[in-house]
Amino acid sequence: MRTKTSLAALAAAFAVVVTGLTGVVPAAQAATVVPDGSTQASAAASCWEVKQVKPSATDGVYWLLTPQLRTPTQFYCDMTTDGGGWVLVGRGRDGWNWDGDAQGTPAQIASTPTGQSAFAPKKLSTATVDALLGGGRVDALSDGVRLRRAANADGTSWQDVRMRIRSLASWSWAFGAGHPLTSASFDGTSFSGATSRDFGTTSTTSANRLRRVWTFESSTNGWVRGFNYGSAVTGSTSASSNLYATGNGNATPFTQVFIRPKLRQSDLSFPTVPDAGTDAITALPVARSGSMAQPWGVTGTGAGGTGELATEVQTFAQIGNTMYVGGNFTTVRNQSGSQSVAQPYLAAFDATTGEWISSFRPTFDNQVRSLAALPDGRLAVGGEFTTANGQARSGLAVLDASSGDLSASWTTEVQNRGSSGKVSVRGLEVSDGQLYVGGLFTHVVKGDLAWYERNGARISLSTGNGDAAWNPNFNGTVAAMDVADDGSRVYFAGYMTASGSTTVKKGVAISTASGAPVASPAWDPTYSTSGASYQQAVKQLGSKVWLGGSQHSMFSYDTSTLTLKDTNITKAGGDLQAIDGTSDVVYGGCHCGDWNYEGTTNYDNFNPGTTSVAWKQASKISLLGAWDNATGAFVTTFAPQWKSRGGFGVWAVSVAKDGTLWAGGSIETSVKDGGGNQFSGGFARFAPRPSKAPSAPSEAKAVVEGSSATVSWKASSSDGVSYEVLRNDRVVATTSSTTVSVPGSTSADRFFVRASDGQGNWSASTAVAKPAQSATVLADGATWSYYFDNTAPVATDWKGDAFDASGWRSGPAPLGWGSGPIATNIDVAAGSTRALTSYYRRTVDIADVAAFTRYRLTTRADDGMVFYVNGTEVARVNLPTGTVGPSTYATAAPSTTTATANPVTIDIPLSALRDGSNVITAEVHSNYRSTPNTSFDANIVASR
């Protein structure tokens, strides 16, 4: 395929010479766009650029586009304040969500920037705000973050707040986390104070009671989320009040949040699209924030007690399409509460619908803390029970997965022959025909046989026998475990400080080789505190192993070297308690309810200080967070909202086979996908966001007429998609149709089409569609030499090069007589006899015939005609075959109007043309001598 440059060069080489008039087809130039934000095609990089391009621009909605946005989107721009150029990223009164997920849509924010209908908060997602920054940092915003807050109840007075954040790479709505400030001002008066969490940060910026922005939640302000004033500013709960307050003071004002990135399209780098088109783009397959409909859940607390180590749900395992749920619950209950059935500690649910499976009814006398699906379809159960289905089973049992009956072939259990006698199995993993067991115990027991395997063991699945040769001999309880993907080691988390005589650090990798040695290299986990350092969750995902636990740590390590990779601390709140995920996304459950801080390992010294911050990024987290496994970045768009008994949070996480995320603990209610609370007894389910690219459209074509391109294509086979048309390197139009007009285009532009599902997934695009390169060789209305007489032309070679037509008359087309537009009347004088045939001749020069691949002739047959190029007949219409002469009648008699409406179009054989001068001739025959009208005109257009 030729490049754009070579096509332009070919076009430039093509010259047309007509009767002394020479025209050269110039090299085509790609479209030049003024980025004034008025259309998708003229999207600006920022509101600020719109204002620079068009100083008269007023407040309103404009199209913006950066490489990170990918698609032109409309945003509201304040074009007045301080010279304008501010983009509105959020607005509302009370009830803001501080997570990174979108609260509403960009269209809702842009269309309703203020007024009572804007009181319900709407904000852009963190990803969208970052896209508006065009890859820049938040702390690089020269104008900082601007808050426009109502200063009185009726919204007639406003306060302007500016905050420059000291160190923040990406946008964060977690204002209450306390990002330290470089400076702040209230109505233009600068304020600079201390930078502790509650003074001089985004959590609290305060010069006095009236000049205060307070974003953290507290009983003092009724736990209202918003950009609150101090205690001196009062409000009311009136739906019309711009100042909301449930008590005296601490009003929450209607607030608009603006930023002013100073970006220009000319400064941005859009990726050049190759002729093959763009690759597909897929979203990170993270779960949705809203929970799925939940027909059944679990409730009540059993023999394990009511503390955080005895939450209602503590473990999941899937076999086939059944999800098994274990914990310290006593009852299964439907959504409405109309049905409650005693089913303590272990229950089964349909993995697709969430319906309780009432045929699975095992019984235990204490809580279930771990589950594992065995290769043969049975279910291994671990916990703190002493009986299963009425039979003695200490800490470990194997069940038939359908009936819940005890497996007749499995009698192995665990015992604790130490002083406490307490048994707790908290981890079960299967690998290479072995069942690995972790928890609190000293022996694996089968009948009269016993194997000493302290707190960590493995059992042959074929025999049920323990393996005394594999005994990690931990001096502390195992809280969680995971067998490495390659089966070479087992990762343990817990309370152990020694494995036999080897010192370990509560997170340890043990080789699966006989003797259970500490794997090499030895794991030296990082503690987040000088105090408690127990670890409670561990999971290998891809090339990383994630370890979480005491003092709120969620750290990852390279599986090859066990060196520290990613670090996170949750605060305020509590420990990490469960980890699961995929190679793409990691989920961590915790009893954390506030913020996740990335880039720090130190829980004890957490104050950001006066000169630097001890963490890189803060984001909202609520009992369960998600991390991008590849980058280690916290995924701000996963933000469930729920309530947890005692705040104990999430103690079990599992990604089902269909991608649904199951999360359990002491969950009571959750916010559904789409809004609204629901009963979520013990656990909630979250559907995966779409992460599959739509099928690609195909066969894109582009035709440029004048200054507009018409782009068309064949539809994608995926349902519910829209199409994005790229001109050169950026999107200029979106549509649900399969054709679109793109104004301001030239024949040098390159077009591509891709499909979008509107949820962050784009198909691969079509291959490039290059508009046909064309040039007019012969124009309509051109001047022709003509001969019209009752005798034939004097020379028989009137079609050849040597013929001298200087004796012929000439005139511009259309030539003829009668009705229709006639530029040159060739009719004879009244009373004279007309000839049957008229003759026409002219020459055109073509510098390089091979510069184009098609030469298309368009003419008319009024009544009959023969068309010649360099003496070669190329078209004949309404005339008999064989030789024709001056007395040959046309075989039809169309009117001039009919002939003009039905043009004759043919492709001239390239062999009929030559470089240089070409002779173009035609003869037109009438159907009868007294015909009232006849006409002739023609054009030739060359194209590739």
Image (tube, helix red, strand yellow):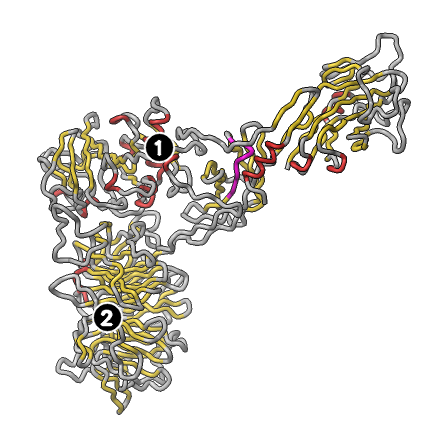
Q: Residue 910, located in which quarter of the rendered image?
A: top right
Q: Residue 8, located in which quarter of the rendered image?
A: top right
- Write the start and end of the magenta stretch as one range: 745-753
Q: Residues within 10 Å of mark 2 (few under 14, many from 20)?
A: many
Q: What is the spatial separation of the Cα atoms under label 2 and label 1, in whole angstroms? A: 55 Å
Residue 449: image x %, image y %? 27, 90
Residue that sits furthest to the top in the current view = 830
Residue 75: image x %, image y %? 35, 34
85 left or right, relative to 942: left
Identified by mark 2, the residue type is Trp
Q: Is residue 341 visible?
A: no
Q: Which residue is mark 2?
A: 523
Q: Which residue is mark 1?
A: 111
Counting residues from the N terminus, which is met first, the one under dot 2 or under dot 1?
1
Residue 764: image x %, image y %? 49, 49
Indicate the secondary structure of the residue bearing disc 1: helix
* Residue beneath the point at 77% across and 20% down: 935
Quadrant position of the N terminus in the picture: top right
Task: Find out whether residue 750 is within the magenta segment.
Answer: yes
